Amino acid sequence: MRSLDQARAVCDRYHPGLLKALEEIPYDDREKPGGTALDLFRSHGGPGLLIPAEFGGHGASPLEAVRVQEALGAVSPSLAAATTMHHFTAAMLYALADRRNRLTPAQVELLHRIVPERKLMASGWAEGRTQQNILAPTVAARPVEGGYRLSGAKKPCSLSSSMDLLTASISVPGADGTPELALAIVPADSAGLTVHPFWGSDLLAAAESEEVRLEDVFVPEELVVRTSADDPNRLDDLQTAGFIWFVLLIAAGYTGASAALVEEVVTHERGNPTERAALALHHEAAVALLEGAARAVQTGVGGEEAVAGALVARYTVQEALVANANRALELLGGMDFIKGSPHFRLAASVRPLAFHPPARPAAAEPLLRYFGGESLELA
């Protein structure tokens, strides 16, 4: 299928051999905990996709990144979901390096090590809480000499077993004593950071979405990103960049899973031509909308307009994917189910897109106000 082939071509350009290596693993093994998918992602240069060339990465564009995630989602929805957390974290952190004096020397030195050391960054933000803003603080921070002591838990936390670094939104006292948002970068081997079983579903199980607990974990001041008097919008910029990347990339992975089903129907000529064409048309419309939002960001659209565009694409795609997957299963037929193909698990894997925040009910009123001419303010 042309759109999926385009996505595969982009993925092969940035990560040669990754898709082939994944396809050589039986589907159930790709999707089970403790598999090799994340190791393959590391060894094929996956961590560097969105990291700028000056830091050793590929510096992929938004459209290219969306297509890479579509290609990964088609072979392993778990891998696409897990790596989205690394990629959107990378996009946020490296966005801060665009201007001078935005990061401390220790933070810059750390960012230069991500690609050569193939480090994976997990997200300790709130993407697991359906009704919550993904950027709301989820970890308590207590100021101590030389830094902060962090306590809290993130559940689920994708990449929990494979992460090298955890990024966590925290609330710290500002210059006037009022709380302000900050970002802590926590090494995964820090004393007090532990991983505990949490994920109980067979779907997306290889994403390593377990519970990560922080019990009085020390983070030095130089690994905490804060606003400053000469850069008061630092975290606002980070939130906007991170939010857009998260919405686009998480939707792209699930789109890939649906694409694999549609391709199966089209390639094997299941159903009649009219049925196949209708299925393909609905899928291509969803892809065009998602990739259109990515193109808009790529051409310079930013701020509220980009956030709204990403959300419109995500919610529309969210509905289309479930309908497409269900229709594809129907056209593949009962014998496909009886023979134990992975298609039913693949179809079920598109549904969790609805569970990632912001959920549609939470965004409904803010979007209505935005469509009516007001500012976009997500709670």
Image (tube, rainbow, N blue to C red):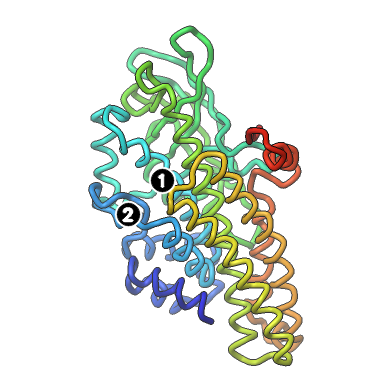
The kind of residue on which mark 1 rests is Ala
The earlier-in-sequence mark between 1 and 2 is 2
In the image, 13 versus 300, the foreground residue is: 300
Quarter occupied by residue 282: bottom right
Q: Say above or below: 273 vs 158.
A: below
Quarter occupied by residue 154: top right
Picture disc at residue 231 = none
| Residue at image location 70% in from the left, 72% down from the top | 324
In the image, 63 versus 204, the foreground residue is: 63
| Residue at image location 28% in from the left, 54% down from the top | 57
Residue 9 percent across, percent down from the top left: 40, 74
Q: Quadrant of the C terminus?
A: top right
Evaluate if marks 1 and 2 touch, with contact meaning CB atoms under 8 Å apart: no
Local secondary structure at mark 1: helix
Mark 2 Cα shell of 10 Å, populated few (<14), some (14-19), many (≥20): some
The kind of residue on which mark 2 rests is Gly
Q: Is residue 96 left or right of residue 355?
A: left
Local secondary structure at mark 2: loop
Residue 48 percent across, percent down from the top left: 33, 54
Picture disc at residue 91 = 1
Q: CA distance from mark 1 to mark 2?
A: 10 Å
| Residue at image location 42% in from the left, 73% down from the top | 19
Residue 205 percent across, percent down from the top left: 58, 59
Residue 107 percent across, percent down from the top left: 29, 33
Q: Is residue 323 left or right of residue 236?
A: right
Q: Is residue 297 left or right of residue 16?
A: right
Picture disc at residue 59 = 2
Q: Quadrant of the N terminus?
A: bottom right
Mark 1 Cα shell of 10 Å, populated few (<14), some (14-19), many (≥20): many
Q: Say above or below: 226 vs 325.
A: above
In the image, 210 versus 134, the foreground residue is: 134
| Residue at image location 31% in from the left, 38% down from the top | 98
